[in-house]
């Protein structure tokens, strides 16, 4: 399979790399050694000399080694991060008196180098190292040659790793570094989240480039391209929000904005190709217009964007415009479909081929050998045991909350709440699937638009009939002229009679007329169906459709005024139930937030008592939230019982059962009306396709008849000259050697004029009609390969298309029977797909023929 056009973005080869953060040199050896000597012993400090020197050397290289290759830089940062993880569990770095309080980490912002942050906290150091790791992966991604398949694959893997590094930073260190401390914007949760989306966008973009290179289908390319655009759109949204709004240069924002628009347009372009192949021309036009709109809007904010990216935008815009012009012309001439508005289109399908790399294994420091002699292994195990206790509390409470929410949903569904109250207030609604079906019917014109469709059928039938009459008049005129000269010159007029040559054409005209007559009968059935079901389908013309639904009304007569009190109490109870649901969501978030901030490692490292006592004290922090959860669930159960009682009174007063029955009846009526509308609409569409194809066939035969008449006219003039010379004695040839009249295109072999046909009947060879070809024909029909529907359904003998019912040998019948002409309108031989289009963007292959089903469904 040949490849579809390459993306303009592929041609630009333009992606972003992240600059690393800068720092200042610090000495870790002496402060950490002093801490060990003071807290443990001088002997322990001497045993850790090598480990401390290794740590100090790693920190120095991170600060100085900017000239390393990206791969070497990556390995250095990973090694140093693992060492920091070991330092964190053994050396409490903070301003407190008995901690390592002489170490301060200073880091500059990667995007605003004049901004800096200083902390006596290892979390800032770890966050900065993770940031630089993600930046290094991004540089590795840009270093590959993306003009090759392998280069694009490796680039994608590098960007996935960069996204993983930024995601790991966001989930593990950004919040910790910001608690009670000031940090630079580049390591904030918002910024690293944006960078994760940006790296995923570039990884997906590399996958898209390979997808194009291997010639995937337009539908697959559209889904992958759309996901590229979605990732860029997410990054753009973060860039335009606080705190990133004024932090990045305009060129960054322009780059991401144009990339988002470019790949949305790319998705519309690819999806349009798929719609074209499926003959969904109206949606193709709408999608292409949407893509153009996005590209045009993006160019308005392209200040500071690279010229390569703008060139890609313009190239894509030109390709979309080319396909759009073609689709509009074909729709106006052939399909006549209504183009939906952009707001009515469903979101473009997307498919993600990438996700952030899981960095847990890469950054796992559990097997590192540094400082193993300093901290007992039971301290690490104790921390793990406490974490499991916290996870168990959160998991148990989360399950209780989810069960409570599900119980509420089921109980309310059983009581038909709050739908019944909404119906009383006039807020009626259809089931989502039924509403979607009604909207689709209304978008296509609805029952009120069927008359326009029927008029199109009548117009096309009239046009076909008029063309048929014109063609028949041409043949009749030629036959009359032939008969006139034959009567005038008698036996000297040796040309074959018109009736002999045009018998096949006359038969085909008769079959065409028969088919038009039968199609008219089918049209009449459709029109009767529209008339008979017009009132039935009129329910679909209600806008909004909810206005057709029955309403839940108050009782006509009321013995007291209790209905208002009951209704008000029920509404109040439902509002309380909704508040309880919102409270549950907040309680679950509180649990997760508390776990995120729960770090007892410093206490474990300095605790001299029992770990169990410490665990009981720390885990008790979660008790008040667990009590609130229990109270919420208990209150909800009591409230549901109250609502059930109130709903029983409400149902009795407002006759809810009768309302439900009438509503279900209305639903069924709408469903039946939709089914009947779709049946009629499909029959009309089949008819339109039938007449459009028939019109082409009649036009083709009319051209053949015109060419035949021109040939006969030329022959007539030549024969008249011969006959006049014979009658005036100007012909001195030997009539005995003359053969039958030679056509204009076949001169005599000996250079002498042919003898009249009536001189030697024993040597006469009957001349074949123009549509036969045993020898050189008098007339050769024009080439038929340019017909838009593939092989011509009318003409001389030819093999039927695949799966064609040849039991009658007469072609299609409006009702699906073979009765009319050679070939089939309803199941033509499909066109073989040509080679896939080459870049840039334009697709030169013609539309495939429309699917032709049975014109009229029995």
Image (cartoon, rainbow, N blue to C red):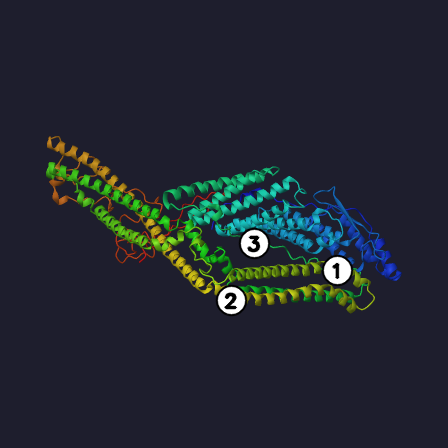
* Image point (49%, 60%), residue name: 420
Q: Is residue 116 left or right of residue 6?
A: right
Res. 599 mark? 1
CB under 8 Å between callouts 2 and 1?
no
Residue 618: where, in percent of width, then height?
75, 64
Q: Closer to the camera, 343 or 194? A: 343
**Foreground disc of the pair 2, 1:** 2
Residue 278 in the figure: left or right of residue 36: left
**Which is more N-terminal, label 3 or label 1?**
3
Residue 328 place in picture, x, y as percent: 42, 42
Q: Which mark is residue 421?
A: none
Q: Which residue is mark 2?
A: 648
Q: Secondary structure at mark 3?
A: loop
The answer to whether residue 10 is visible is no
Q: Residue at x 73, y 62 (%)?
A: 366
Give the class, few, some or many, for how many residues have Cα within 10 Å of label 1's Cα (few <14, many ≥20). Answer: some
Residue 314 at least partly seen? yes
Of label 2 and label 1, which has the lower sequence position? 1
Rendered image: mark on residue 352: 3
């Amino acid at each position: 399979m040949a490849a579809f056009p390459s993306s303009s973005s592929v041609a630009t080869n333009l992606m972003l790399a992240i600059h690393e953060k800068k720092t200042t040199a610090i000495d870790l050896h002496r402060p950490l050694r002093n801490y060990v000597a003071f807290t443990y012993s001088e002997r322990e400090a001497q045993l850790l000399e090598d480990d401390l020197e290794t740590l100090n050397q790693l920190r120095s290289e991170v600060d100085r080694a900017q000239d390393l290759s990206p791969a070497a830089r990556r390995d250095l940062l990973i090694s140093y991060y693992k060492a920091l993880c070991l330092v964190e569990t053994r050396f409490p770095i903070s301003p407190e008196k008995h901690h390592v309080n002489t170490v301060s980490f200073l880091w500059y912002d990667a995007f605003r180098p004049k901004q800096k942050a200083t902390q006596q906290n290892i979390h800032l150091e770890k966050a900065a190292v993770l940031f630089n790791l993600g930046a290094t992966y991004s540089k590795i991604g840009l270093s590959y040659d993306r003009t090759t398949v392998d280069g694009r694959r490796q680039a994608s893997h590098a960007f996935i790793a960069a996204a993983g590094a930024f995601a790991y930073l966001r989930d593990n260190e950004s919040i910790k570094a910001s608690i009670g401390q000031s940090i630079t914007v580049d390591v904030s949760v918002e910024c690293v989240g944006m960078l994760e989306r940006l790296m995923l966008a570039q990884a997906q973009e590399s996958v898209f480039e390979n997808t194009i290179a291997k010639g995937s289908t337009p539908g697959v390319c559209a889904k992958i391209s759309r996901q590229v655009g979605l990732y860029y759109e997410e990054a753009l949204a973060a860039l335009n929000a606080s705190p990133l709004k004024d932090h990045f240069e305009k060129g960054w924002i322009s780059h991401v904005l144009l990339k988002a628009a470019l790949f949305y347009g790319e998705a519309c372009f690819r999806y349009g190709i798929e719609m074209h192949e499926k003959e969904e021309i109206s949606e193709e036009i709408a999608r292409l217009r949407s893509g153009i709109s996005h590209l045009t809007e993006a160019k308005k904010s392209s200040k500071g964007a690279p010229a390569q990216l703008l060139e890609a935008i313009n190239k894509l815009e030109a390709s979309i415009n080319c396909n759009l012009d073609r689709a509009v012309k074909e729709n106006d001439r052939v399909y006549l479909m209504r183009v939906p508005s952009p707001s009515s289109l469903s979101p473009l399908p997307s498919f993600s081929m990438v996700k952030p790399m899981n960095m847990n294994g890469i950054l796992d420091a559990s097997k590192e050998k540094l400082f193993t002699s300093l901290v007992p292994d039971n301290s690490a195990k104790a921390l793990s045991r406490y974490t499991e206790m916290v996870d168990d509390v959160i998991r148990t409470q989360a399950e209780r909350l989810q069960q409570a929410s599900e119980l509420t949903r089921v109980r309310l569904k059983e009581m038909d709440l709050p739908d019944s109250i909404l119906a009383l207030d006039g807020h009626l609604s259809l089931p989502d699937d039924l509403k979607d079906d009604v909207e689709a019917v209304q978008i296509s014109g609805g029952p009120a638009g069927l008359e326009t469709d029927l008029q199109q059928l009548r117009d096309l039938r009239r046009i076909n009939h008029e063309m048929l009459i014109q063609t028949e008049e041409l043949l009749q005129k030629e036959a009359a002229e032939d008969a006139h000269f034959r009567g005038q010159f008698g036996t000297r007029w040796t040309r074959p009679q018109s009736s002999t040559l045009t018998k096949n054409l006359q038969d085909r005209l008769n079959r065409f007329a028969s088919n038009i007559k039968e199609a008219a009968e089918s049209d009449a059935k459709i029109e009767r169906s529209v008339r008979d079901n017009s009132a039935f389908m009129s329910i679909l013309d209600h806008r909004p459709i909810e206005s057709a639904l029955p309403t839940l009304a108050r009782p006509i007569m009321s013995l007291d005024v209790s209905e208002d009190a009951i209704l008000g109490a029920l509404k109040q109870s439902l509002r309380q139930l909704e508040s309880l649901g919102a409270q549950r969501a907040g309680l679950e978030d509180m649990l997760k937030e508390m776990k995120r901030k729960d770090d007892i490692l410093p206490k474990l490292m300095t605790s001299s008592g029992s770990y169990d006592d410490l665990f009981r004290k720390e885990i008790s922090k979660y008790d008040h939230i667990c009590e609130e959860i229990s109270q919420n669930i208990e209150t909800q159960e009591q409230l549901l019982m109250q609502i059930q009682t109130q709903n029983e009174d409400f149902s009795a007063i407002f006759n809810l059962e009768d309302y439900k029955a009438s509503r279900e009846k209305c639903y069924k009526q709408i469903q039946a009306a939709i089914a009947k509308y779709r049946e009629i609409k499909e029959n009309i569409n089949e008819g339109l396709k039938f007449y459009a194809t028939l019109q082409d066939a009649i036009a083709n035969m009319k051209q053949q008849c015109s060419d035949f008449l021109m040939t006969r006219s030329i022959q007539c003039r030549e024969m008249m000259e011969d006959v006049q010379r014979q009658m005036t004695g100007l012909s001195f040839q030997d009539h005995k050697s003359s053969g039958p009249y030679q056509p204009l295109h076949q001169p005599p072999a000996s250079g002498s004029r042919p003898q009249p046909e009536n001189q030697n009947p024993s040597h006469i060879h009957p001349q074949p009609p123009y549509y036969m070809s045993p020898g050189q024909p008098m007339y050769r029909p024009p080439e038929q390969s340019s017909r838009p529907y593939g092989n011509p359904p009318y003409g001389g003998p030819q093999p039927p298309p695949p799966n064609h019912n040849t039991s009658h040998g007469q072609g299609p019948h409006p009702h699906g029977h073979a009765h009319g002409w050679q070939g089939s309108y309803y199941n033509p031989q499909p066109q073989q797909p040509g080679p896939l289009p080459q870049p840039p963007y334009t697709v030169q292959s013609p539309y495939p023929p429309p699917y032709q089903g049975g014109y009229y469904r029995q």
